[in-house]
Each structure stands twice: as structure tokens, then as C-alpha cells.
Amino acid sequence: MAKNEIQTTGVNTICDETVINGDIIAKNDLRIDGHINGNLVTTGRVVVGTTGIITGDIRCSNIEILGTVHGDIEATDIITIKGDAKVDGNVTTKRLSVEPGIFFNGTCKMSNSDSNNKE
């Protein structure tokens, strides 16, 4: 990349101790280590780090949760919940991966778009 070129792809990062009040709409991947009070919508991947807290609904392609989410999650591909993560809300996804030790309070609806089109 030339010295004056601007990188147009990448990961948006919300750092620890950062608080955002409002919705976030993005095309690229997001890493959340701070606090979001609002809905999050992206066509990319979301990582909620161990210090990350989201209070709002999330729509994305896939998400890995190590922190806390208070809200519904809809992922078109996979939801992965790891470590000491806390999820308080309903999840809708094609695939779900859950490690022992996490906290999950809600319902899970799994769908496979391929099987939905078959009779």
C-alpha cells in the first residue's frame, strides 16, 4: 500500500472503557471490548471480548461472545459462546457452538436455509 492510500477494509474496534450510546451499522467486522447501549447491525463478523458488554439486539453473519450480551442475537451463519460469557436474550442462527461454563438465558431457534426450501 502506498504511503498516502487509505485502507478501506478492516476491523472496527471499540476499546475497553469506551461507551457508545446509540445504534451501530457497519459493513466490516467489529470487535467490542467496551460498552454498547444500542443495536448493532453488520454484514460482517462480531467479536465481543471478555470486557465487552452489549445491551441491545445484534444482527450479523457470525458472532463470537466472550463477554456479555443483553439482547436478541440473529446470525446468518454461526453463534459461538465461550469461556465465562453471559447471554441474556433469544438467539436465531444456522449453527450454534456453546462451551461449558457459559450463562445463557433465552431461547434458541436454529434454521437451515437449505432445508427450509425443501418440501
Image: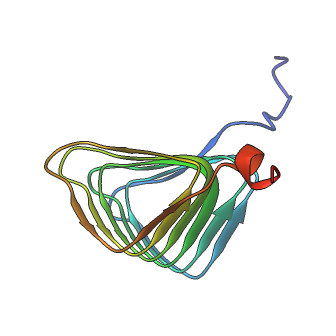
Q: Say left or right for 9 vs 2.
A: left
Q: Quadrant of the N terminus?
A: top right
Q: What percent of the width, then of the height, locates residue 83?
A: 21, 44
Q: Is residue 111 or residue 18 the one in the foreground? A: 111
Most distant residue in the front direction: 119
Query: Residue 61: horizontal and vertical position, in percent?
Result: 65, 49
**Above or below — where is 9 with respect to 80?**
above
Give the residue drawn at x 81%, y 54%: 119
In depth, the one of 100 and 39 nearer the eye is: 100
Give the residue displayed 58% in from the left and 82% down from the top.
Answer: 22
Residue 93: x %, y % from top left: 56, 55
The location of residue 96, given as percent across then percent down, is: 44, 47
Q: Is residue 55 above or below residue 110?
A: below
Horizontal side of residue 17 vs 45, given as left or right: left
For the point 28% across and 44% down, the residue is 82
Residue at 59% over, 49% down: 94
- Relative to 49, 95 lies left or right: right
